[in-house]
Structure formats: structure tokens, C-alpha cells
Amino acid sequence: MRIRGKKYKAKVKLVDKAKRYMVDEAMELVKNTAIAKFDESVELAIKLGVDSKKNMIRGTVVLPAGSGKSKKVAVLTKQERVKEAQDAGASVAGADDLVEKIKGGFLGFDVLIATPDMMPQIGKLGKILGTKGLMPNPKSGTVTNDLAKTVKEFMSGKVEFRMDKTAVLHMVLGKVSFDKDALTKNFYAALSEIRKQKPSGLKGNYIESIAVSSSMGPGIRLDARAITDKMEKEH
């Protein structure tokens, strides 16, 4: 059992466990319940009402206020397009040479983008990249011919989300140093994109519960029904 310190216990008291918060309240509270001296991430967790064996909910979203993290982007493409990727800001770009480098254990990047013509070589890296969640995939926007746009989007705040085996989706919304409005905008952008991934014909609630927390702080439950109802009325 994890032993919680005095700071954590003090922050927990700020959260009403029985309450389901609206977004602006939750974002204010998540800033006030951060514990660490460093700038903690604000994390979103959504329990989805889908069968994880039949459906994989994943995609990307451009967070309006950015993610607060500077991402290292790598690009796998044909040799003639390597300079294009580098000029767009990729930390590393290569063709067969980068494939061999990754085979040798190099994983010095947060996102790997690949052009479609490199997919046969990408297949050879499945065991290495798959376990780290770095495998390029068209659904996550990381398999593309539009290198310049995609590299810049991931560097400026585009993040990937993916549901795990327990049908819980996790992603970062920003940093506790962000103001409440910035976190709120990021939240709605993320939830809007996640709702678009709802499987057709799904019965019952798609979004069962929503929670946010800072990296080290307590969880804060949101009113999932009221929030989704509000979004439906506004669109």
C-alpha cells in the first residue's frame, strides 16, 4: 500500500469526494491540489463504456493552449525527404539508417512520424516500438505524407490519446502553471475529439466517468453527464 505524506493528505481535504465538479471548478481545484515543487502535469482519465476487446479508441487532438511539454519528434521517411523533416523541426530524421538505429535501441524521441512508403520497414520495429506506444499509426495521425504540418502540430501541442485494456483513456491536458481558462479550453478540445471516436451503434453511456488530477495530487471527479449534455446542446 502506498503511504501518503502530509502534503497529500492536506490536499485531499480540499476535494469533496461526494461531489461531481463542473469543468471550471475542477480546473481551479486541480491547480490548488498540486503538491510537488516542479510544474506538475494535469492529467485526464475517462472511463469509456465500450468493450476494449472489440473497440480501440485512439486518436489525436491539438490542444489550443499546448501541452506544456516540448516534444522530441522523429521522422522515418525516404532519404530525399529527410531534409524536409529536419527543416520542419524534427529532432531526428532518417530512412534505413534510422531504422537500424532504432533496432539498436535508440528511442530518443516522444513521437515517431512515418511516411506511408516506410511502413514495410516500420513493421520490422513492431516489438520495439509497440511496447513503448511509439508505433506510427494512421489513426493517430503519425503516418502521413504531410511531414511539415504534422511535425509542427506535434511540436506545438498535438497529443495522442489511447484507451487501455480496462477501457480507461488517459492523456495530459497541460501543466498546473496554466491558467484555468487554458486548461478548460484544452479539456473541451480533448473531450470533443474523444466523443467523435464513439463507435456507431453503441448502446448505453459512451463516457461513463471523467476525472482530472495533477501528477502527484488527488483525483477530482467531474459531472460527466452534465458536461456531455451541455456539449450536445451547444452543438
Image (cartoon, rainbow, N blue to C red):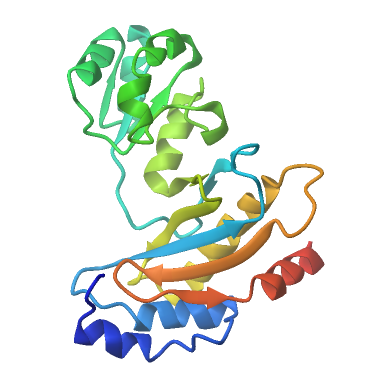
- Count of labels in the image: 0
Q: Position of residue 127 (x, y in %)?
A: 34, 22
Residue drawn at x 31%, y 53% is 69
Reply above or below: 160 against 119: below
Tell me the quarter of the image containing the N terminus: bottom left
Asked if residue 174 lies left or right of residue 98, the reply is: right
Q: Is residue 154 above or below residue 2?
A: above
Q: Name the quadrant of the C terminus.
A: bottom right
Q: Nearer the viewer, residue 158 or 58?
A: 58
Q: Position of residue 206 (x, y in %)?
A: 70, 56
Tell me which corner region of the image, top left, top right, bottom left or bottom right, holds residue 217.
Answer: bottom left
Residue 174, picture quadrant: bottom left
x, y percent for residue 39: 25, 68
Identity of the residue drawn at 41% across and 63% down? 43
Q: Residue at x 25, y 78 (%)?
A: 35
Vertically, is 41 above or below 221?
A: above
Q: Nearer the viewer, residue 162 or 190?
A: 162
Residues 3 and 66: in front is: 3
Left/right placement of residue 80 relative to residue 230 reads left
